[in-house]
Image: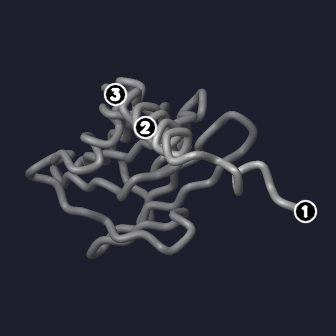
Amino acid sequence: MPRSYDRWSDERLLGELARALRAGERVPPETVAAGRAVFAWRAADAELAGGDPDGRIHHVAGLTIELEIAADTLVVRLTPAQPAEVEARGPRLASHPATPVEKGRFTIRPLPRFPFYLLCRTAGGRKVVTGWILG
């Protein structure tokens, strides 16, 4: 039994292709901004902490940043534990500071629901950023 698209005329096929191409032109502005932000410098003077495949542990020389998601909260642990400022940043979030819980442990509420990265400033003056984290 012939399928309906087997009987399409050339004009109908070209019309459907044109419609599909026009649909791709209507990309929401926030999606465009997020795409551009991926390639933007996050902090030119910061070290980039490499992450494991699931994005929960990030390492840079002498510092480990561990992430744990609990309900609507992101828990951040620095090892070795040390005083620091931690904030989430992203294309839809200029800055969302973490709340210190104890030395080396921080929380971010609510959990960002879009891609973000962490910027950590240690008391010793070191700046470290993580790779992108999917919220």
The image quarter in which residue 98 lies: top left
Rendering quarter of residue 86: top left
Identity of the residue drawn at 32% across and 42% down: 35
Q: Would you say the residues marked 1 and 3 are in contact, meaning their CB atoms lie under 8 Å apart?
A: no
Q: CA distance from mark 1 to mark 3?
A: 59 Å
**Residue with the mark numbered 1:** 1
Q: Tag on residue 18? A: 2
Q: Which of the pair 103/7 is nearer the observer?
A: 7
At a point 25% along the width and 41% down the height, the residue shown is: 36
Name the amino acid, label 1.
Met
In this picture, residue 79 sits left or right of residue 124: right
Secondary structure state at the residue bearing disc 1 = loop
Residue 80 drawn at (x, y percent): 41, 66
| Residue positioned most to the left | 45
Residue visible at 30% across and 74% down? Answer: 62
Q: Give how far across and how far down residue 116 sits, in percent.
A: 42, 42
In the rendered image, residue 54, in percent from the top left (x then y), is placed at: 57, 68
Q: What's the mark number on residue 95?
A: 3
Q: Report how far apart the C-alphas of labels 2 and 3 lie in the structure.
A: 41 Å
